[in-house]
Amino acid sequence: EIIEDIDARRQSEERLRLLLRASELLARSLDYDQTLGEVARLVVPAVADWCFFDLVDDESAYRRVAAANADPSNAGLAARFRRGYGPLPEARHGISHVARSGRPELVVEVDDELLLSLARDEEQLAGMRALGLASFLSVPLIARGRTIGVLTLATAESGRRLSAADLPFAEDLGRRAAAAIDNARLTIESQRHVDRLNALLEVSRQVAEAELDPRQTLRVVAEQASRRIGDGCTIRLLDEEGTALETWASFHVDPAVRLRLQQATSRPLSPVGGLHGPVVQGGHALLTPVLQREHFAAVDNDYQAYAEFAGLHSLLIVPLRGRERVIGTLALTRERTRAPYDVEDQMLAQELADRAALAVDNARLYQAAQAAVTVREEFLSIAAHELKTPLTTVKGYAQMLRRQLDRGEPQSQVLEHSADSLLRQLARLENLVTDLLDVSRIQQGQLAFRPERCDLSEIAAQVLAHFEQAPELGADHQLTLDAPAAVAGTWDPARLDQVLTNLISNALKYSPNGGEVLVRVRPRGTGAEVSVRDQGLGIAPEQQPRLFQPFARLPAAILRDGEGVSGSGLGLYICRQIVERHGGTIVVESAPGVGSTFTVRLPR
């Protein structure tokens, strides 16, 4: 009894030293795969002939992270043993049973019946028999109330048998290993959060320094995403029509690859189909840890060549979401030398993309506000000039009339000329005020319409009749109406009068050398069409997109009297709003020196 007691104490002291040494190993590094391997080799052969550590992942799959055997020549058998021992989900013994129940399992004598219950097939059974297992002991690795893995000790060639006396040691070692694994995971996760926060802070700082320049902002984000998530990054934005994804920024950590990436991503992509289409349409990320051949069928030849050159291995595309809509995509690629993208990478990429989208939206809103301020200032200048000119004329004629009346000798010819001039300038003022009121109503959605049955040809004839005495009509001008038949429909005649008046007035003003102004009215399918063609100065292609914007005016044209073309820049904007409220369209065809044709198409 004394000798047995001494042996028990020695074994207890030896195992305590093993546990202390195991704790040192587990605390030495956050790489628990490596430290568990060292612990397994520490236990063998002091306690058992075999030692295994299997961890459970989030999908309840098992990953063997460490295995040790007293005889190194059995390494091949260990792999087969893992396959055979690895775990049938509903097995009544072994790793899955211990992980599922959370309780240890001790098998003092391993028999063939047990092996048959664990084996999936004959090959696995043969491998397990070749190991010659005599006994095994499995304990759960439990951290914060959750089973994260299983520690297994087994005996074989030594002929020893594990017993209940080995259970406290295995459970203690399991607790220490579980705590070390959990701490390592928490530390790694915490460090990832710190790294992510630092990345986001750095991006936010650099974005703030980009001074509301969206292109520079996206260049900063692309570079940071490449360096912190890697390896290459391309950011695309939808164009104004939403019909194409245009590349705004691209970066690669390797300068030699960067140029190839920029060349391969220079062409716009369709926002429908391909790899980017589902991201744009659905607003959800596309995570492809390992690229397959079929993925490259969705890209063009240039990008396929780049993918082969760079050795692309993993792909991640996240949406740029601004004000609850997708405005573009951020695509990341990794080469074969790097680990595939995972959910953590996706989360960081999405946060970078969200910051980029917010910055782009802010920059665009700021630019739009600046443009609006510029337009407002231009308009105020134009309106002040347009108001001042007739007011000056009115004031001059009023003063002249006052002098005539003061002398008591008013001349009828002077009075008639003054009255006509006063009426023209007052009409000009009235038109400007009417335009301003219409713009205000349009912007508030309160522009009134009174549709009724009317004849477009008749409206055109009435408008042309008004222009027979108009100041814009010069001696070299010729007004022509081509309306051979009535074109009836349900429209607001006063508003269509307003449209034609603006178009004909512009045609006359921008034809300083005279020429024909032709107004043509025709039925068009189930609708109607009216066009106004002049032989005037014409409009350059780059100026045409601005024509129908509020307060937009063309560069000053010189008229016969050496003065610039007058106008508030509101007429064509109001015309478009009226036409579109009728469900129609208005377009222009023009070129410098050959005149312009404005065409209005209306449903009946």
Image (cartoon, rainbow, N blue to C red):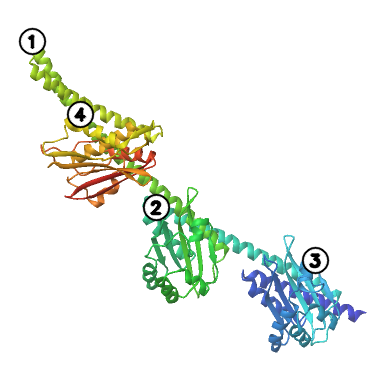
- Amino acid bearing label 4: Lys
Q: Quadrant of residue 419?
A: top left
In this rendering, which labeled residue sits more in front, label 2 or label 3?
Answer: 2
366 left or right of 54? left
Judged from the image, the secondary structure of the residue bearing numbered disc 4 is helix
- Amino acid bearing label 3: Ser
User: 190 or 543: nearer the eye?
Assistant: 543
Q: Position of residue 345 (x, y in %)?
A: 54, 63
Judged from the image, the secondary structure of the residue bearing numbered disc 1 is loop
In this rendering, which labeled residue sits more in front, label 2 or label 4?
Answer: 2
Name the residue that disc number 3 marks: 101
Name the residue furthest right: 1
Which mark is first along the chain, 1 or 2? 2
Viewer can see residue 149: yes
* Disc assigned to residue 241: 2
Judged from the image, the secondary structure of the residue bearing numbered disc 3 is helix
In this rendering, which labeled residue sits more in front, label 4 or label 1?
Answer: 1
- Amino acid bearing label 1: Gly
Viewer can see residue 43: no
**Which residue lies at the image location 63% right of the left edge and 62% below the top edge?**
186
- Amino acid bearing label 2: Glu
Name the residue that disc number 4 marks: 388
Q: Quadrant of residue 120?
A: bottom right
**Which residue lies at the image location 16% right of the left edge and 32% below the top edge?**
471
The alpha-carbon separation of the residues under discs 1 and 3 comes to: 119 Å
The alpha-carbon separation of the residues under discs 3 and 4 comes to: 92 Å
Which mark is first along the chain, 4 or 3? 3
